[in-house]
Image (cartoon, grey):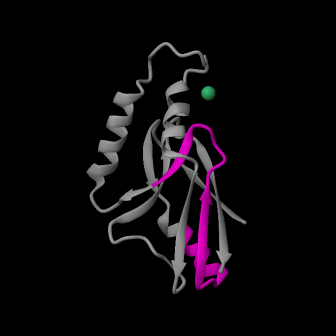
Amino acid sequence: MKTFTVRSSQREEFIDISHEIQRMIDESNVKEGICFVFVPHTTAGITINEGSDRSVRFDILKRLAELVPENLKYEHLEGNADAHIKTSLVGSSASIPIFGGKLTLGTWQKIFLCEFDGPRVRTVFVQVIEI
Ligand code: ZN
């Protein structure tokens, strides 16, 4: 298990972590297997989506904010109930096949840490499993 940290700078943002994850696969020397990425947080998640056109990540954040507004009346009184719900919607992990020592992401795909209650320092766990 390897870890790295990501520092977010806004309350909500998607941060491309594909490069760091590929670097860990490079260090592991695994050529064929699975890369399991997990964030141990309740207000930040993981998703894979378009990384080329930045407007896609802004559209996702905007629509999530419309689905789950920040200032509704929630039971959770910490002021970040929306961030917990958004985290459950995107999930806390991703599994990506490794082939030829590389993440087999599609041409436009990137792996994003989804910050919903920043700015904070977040931890990412990466397990590179050889098959
Ligand atoms: Zn909370």
Which residue is located at x 55 percent, y 21 percent? 79
Q: Could you tell me which residue is drawn at 52 percent across and 32 percent down?
A: 85
Decide: is 88 above or below 111. Answer: above
Image location (x, y in percent) of residue 95? 56, 63
Q: Residue at x 56, y 32 (%)?
A: 84
Most extreme residue toward the front, as rendered? 131
Horizontally, residue 30 falls left or right of residue 102, namely right
Whether residue 62 appears in magenta in the rendering, the answer is: no
| Residue stretch in magenta | 21-47
Q: Is residue 74 above or below residue 16?
A: above
Q: Position of residue 52 (x, y in %)?
A: 30, 62
Left or right of 92? Residue 61 is: left
- In the depicted structure, whether residue 109 falls above or below residue 87: below
Task: Give 23 or 32, whichever is nearer the viewer.
Answer: 32
Quadrant that contains the N terminus:
bottom right
In the image shown, does 5 or 62 lie closer to the viewer? 62
